Image (tube, helix red, strand yellow):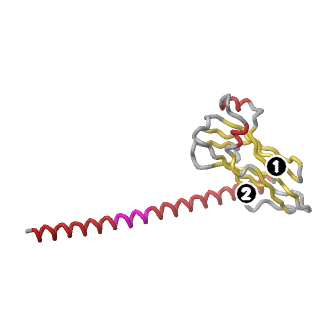
Amino acid sequence: MNKKAAMEMSVGTIVTIVLLMAVLVMGIFLVQKIFKSATGAVDAVDQEVQSEITKLFAEEGAALAVYPTSRQITLKKGDDPKGFAFSVKNVDDANTIKFGYTTTANDQDTSFAKCGSTFTKAKAESYLLGGAGSFTLGGGNALDLPRLVKFDVPETAPPCTIIYELTIRKAGEDWKTVDIFVTIG
C-alpha cells in the first residue's frame, strides 16, 4: 500500500512540474510578445512625428515646426517623461549656420501663481529633459531627426499649467520664440 501511495505522489509531482513549466514558458512567450509590440509602437510614434514635421515644412514653408502643432501637452505626475518635438530649417540657401535652442519656464505669466506660492521658475525648469542644445545646418537643410524636449514630472508636482518658452537662436541671436503649454494633472 505504501509503494502505491508513493508512486501516485511521484506521478502527481511530475505532472505538477510539467504543468508549471508549460505555464512558465507561455508566460515568458507572452512577455516577449508584449515587449516586442511596445517597441513597435514607439517606432511608429517616432515615424509619425517625423512625417508630421516634414509635412509642416512642405505645406507651410515654415522655418520652424513644432509637434504637437497645438503646442499643448498634458502630463500626469510620476508618469514616463513626455514632451514635444521641433525641427528647424535653414532657409538661407548659401550659408551654413549654427543654431541653438533653450527651453525656459515663463515666470512672467500669471498662471505661474496657480502652481502655488512656493513654486519657482527653478522648480519648473527642473522638470526639463533636453531643454537646451545646439546644431549646425547647411543652406536649405532641415534637421534629419527632430529634437525632443521632455518633461519628467515628479509625484510632488502641483496640478497646474506652466508656460515654457522655446527660444531658437540663429548665429547667436534670438530668432524664433514659441510658447509651449504644459498642464500637469
Quarter of the image with the C terminus is top right
What number is the disc on residue 81?
none
- Identify whether 12 is placed above or below 81: below
Left or right: 123 as drawn, with respect to 9: right
Nearest to the observer: residue 41 or residue 35? 35
Magenta region, mostly helix, strand or loop?
A: helix
Residue occupying the point 81% across, 44% down: 177
Question: In which quadrant of the rendered view does residue 120 lie?
Answer: top right
The crowd level at tag 2 (other Cα within 10 Å; few <14, some 14-19, many 20+) is many
Q: Which residues are magenta?
A: 22-30
In x, y percent, where is residue 144? Answer: 75, 62
Nearest to the observer: residue 51 or residue 138? 138
Q: Are the residues tagged 2 and 1 within 8 Å (C-beta)?
A: no
The crowd level at tag 1 (other Cα within 10 Å; few <14, some 14-19, many 20+) is many
Magenta span contains residue 134: no
Left or right: 143 as drawn, with respect to 37: right
Specify the farthest residue to the left: 1
In x, y percent, where is residue 54? Answer: 73, 58
Magenta span contains residue 27: yes
Residue occupying the point 69% across, 43% down: 126
Residue occupying the point 67% across, 49% down: 150
What number is the disc on residue 168?
1
In x, y percent, where is residue 1? Answer: 7, 68
